[in-house]
Image (cartoon, rainbow, N blue to C red):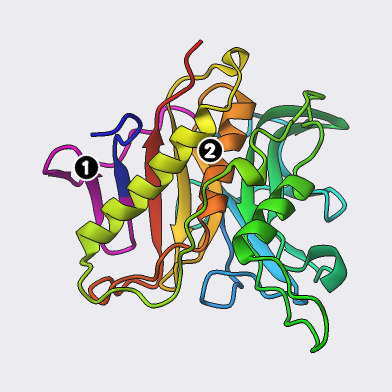
Amino acid sequence: MRDGLDRVLVRSTVLCVAFVLSLPVFSAAEPRQSTPTLDFDLPSNNGNGLLDLGQSFEFSVRLKGLKPGRGEELVAVFESLAYPHRLVSLTSDDASADLLASTRFEARPITAGAGQPLRMEVVVARLRGLRLETLFSRAVYLTMGPVPSAPSGTAPASSPSTALLSAILEEAPEIDRHGRPVHPLLLPDKIVVEESGGGGSPDVSGPLYWKQVGESVSLNWQQRRAQLRKDQAGRGLRVQFRLYPGGFAQLIQIERSSGNPNVDEAAMRTVLSLHPFPPFPPDIREPSVDVHVDLPGVKR
């Protein structure tokens, strides 16, 4: 088995199964949560997974494993290049012990965000009086609807894969919120992109489909990882994204960090470079499935 192809976990609302691709082992055990976690959701997307261009959308977070102390409040700060930063209080969920925050973002102008993935960073902070103390942050990529068709007589647009990769590099900030540089780690012309999408093969079954998804992410990660500098070392990590029947990936994020923000960013861009994936085969009937892929870290 190729280096980096450890496993891909597939979670749906009906069943949680862990596929260990190197061995025919199946387990229903959930990964243990040892630190506070954030779950992201898009209650108002259009059903196929993509956010509609020119329309507002709701973005929500669920905080698990952390509670406010006496005399303090926990808040979520939503940070993005496309929108002004906003602070939203985290409130208790009556049905669970979790904390929730939700906000609505207005439509972006077509010329400013047509088809580009949106990088959102959510900061969880403690508010004591007028003092705001950052606890931790998480980044997530949101994928947008396709670019409107160009009028007749105009020059043909670049391929979706090339346009998406260019947009990723344009969208990525030059520095993160801590002032650390965020450099493009691999230029588009150095990435081998296999065109996906189109009609899925009826001969592909669910288990084989998930194996192919995991292999695609792992192989592309090996290429991207080889371009990282030795001083960008990081331990093994896990990338997570939500996949829809049409093959569209949404809510691309890091489930378990490598400890190096540059390595984490490269892992998320690996998934973006493969978006869209092939459509679901007929025997996968869930409206969406959360996919979790383990990736090896970068050694010194």
Amino acid type of the residue that numbered disc 1 sits on in the rendered structure: Leu
The answer to whether any part of residue 101 appears in the image is: no
Which residue is found at the position 46% from the left and 46% from the top?
240
Q: Secondary structure at mark 2?
A: helix
Is residue 268 toward the left or the right of residue 169 in the image? left
Amino acid type of the residue that numbered disc 2 sits on in the rendered structure: Ala
Q: Is residue 55 above or below residue 179?
A: below
> Residue 79 at what x, y percent from top left?
78, 45
Q: Magenta stretch containing residue 150, yes or no?
A: no
Magenta range = 10-39
Tell me which label, 2 or 1, sits earlier in the chain: 1
Residue denoted by label 2: 267
> Residue 149 at what x, y percent from top left?
73, 82
Which residue is found at the position 31% from the left and 54% from the top?
212
Residue denoted by label 1: 21
Q: Is residue 260 above or below residue 209?
A: above
Query: 9 or 92, which lies in front?
Result: 9
